Amino acid sequence: MPYSEQTVQSVRPWSEKTFSFTLSRPLDFKFENGEFVTIGLKQEGKMVARAYSIVSTTDRDHLEFLSIHVPDGPLTGKLAQIRPGDSVWVNSKATGSLTLNHVLPGRTLYLLATGTGLAPFISLIRDPALYARYETVALVHSVRTAAELAYREEIEALNNPQLRYVPTVTREPFPTPERGGDLFRFGTLSQRLGLPVPDPEQDRVMICGNPEMTRELTHHLKDTGWTLTNHRGVGNFTTEVAFVIHHE
Ligand SMILES: Cc1cc2nc3c(=O)[nH]c(=O)nc-3n(C[C@H](O)[C@H](O)[C@H](O)COP(=O)(O)OP(=O)(O)OC[C@H]3O[C@@H](n4cnc5c(N)ncnc54)[C@H](O)[C@@H]3O)c2cc1C
């Protein structure tokens, strides 16, 4: 049985559509910061399980996740109701393409996230090893409404001069609606942060977001001379979709 039964320790709502929660960590569960694991609930004896990026770091004895709530979603319709003491099942194997080993060290590391795609990057920015590999880490979190800016206070409280945090909101003035991916593509981001123009020789990019944003940015980067990390080698950018769109 690859799943082990774990206990919900805490639940933290962010907005009507997003919440975080922590679980006990299986004793022998190993992962790298930035990876995802399949977690599930048993519903009428059947396991309903989905991929989830791990927000917490490897040195903690709990596992933390950031979740969407899809009202009629097979998993999150129920997961949104979990309370401390409830059970959630965790697969024994974590994997993913957003670990420190998936891009070369360099000057600036751009972490570009939409929605719950922030999750793996919270794990990475909590890891001191990140700041030894890059001079600057620019974290862009793009969401629809300001309430969905999960972990905002914690990120700001890190008060790390190497970490530049750029929250962007698409459907409300914040102060103006803007898309994080566009900021990067159009060169506005580096300009705003006073950083050099992104250069594939020196800078690195990690993308985790909705499939459209991930595709758009991947095309943009490939067209402008960047190399995607794959089984043949480590490049200067790496991606993971934050969810898959299921068509009826
Ligand atoms: C590699 C990977 C990592 C993932 N990590 C996370 C994570 O850390 N947190 C998380 O909440 N989800 C994550 N997901 C998505 C997750 O696996 C489920 O899709 C999600 O929990 C919804 O499950 P569901 O059964 O309720 O609905 P599903 O039937 O899985 O999804 C229904 C629809 O909801 C939409 N949707 C699903 N997930 C999201 C999302 N995260 N944000 C916006 N819209 C969504 C899509 O349109 C989808 O077609 C990840 C997916 C992948 C492939």
Image (tube, rainbow, N blue to C red):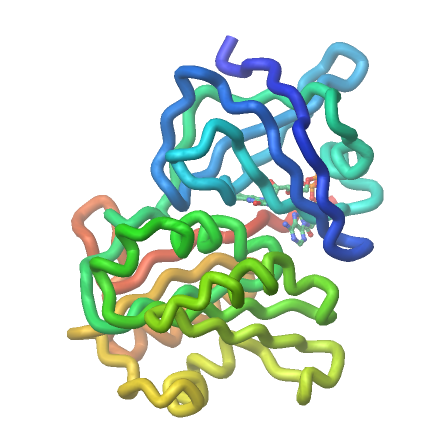
Residue 50 seen in this snapshot = yes
| Residue 188 position within the rendered picture, expressed as x and y whole percent measured from the top left | 44, 89
149 to 89, vertically: above or below? below
6 to 9, vertically: above or below? above
181 to 41, vertically: above or below? below
Q: Is residue 168 left or right of residue 130?
A: right
Residue at 51% x, 44% y: name it: 55
Residue at 27% x, 87% y: name it: 196
Ligand 1 quadrant?
top right
177 to 233, vertically: above or below? below
Q: Is residue 135 left or right of residue 216?
A: left
* Quadrant housing the C terminus: top right
| Residue 211 position within the rendered picture, expressed as x and y whole percent measured from the top left | 54, 59
Q: Quadrant of residue 42?
A: top right
Taking depth in this image into account, of 113 and 230 the one nearest to the observer is 113
Residue at 43% x, 84% y: name it: 189
Residue at 72% x, 38% y: name it: 11
Q: Is residue 186 left or right of residue 198?
A: right
Q: Quadrant of residue 111?
A: bottom left
Q: Is residue 97 left or right of residue 65?
A: left
| Residue 32 position within the rendered picture, expressed as x and y whole percent measured from the top left | 35, 37
| Residue 192 position within the rendered picture, expressed as x and y whole percent measured from the top left | 44, 89
Residue 186 seen in this snapshot = no
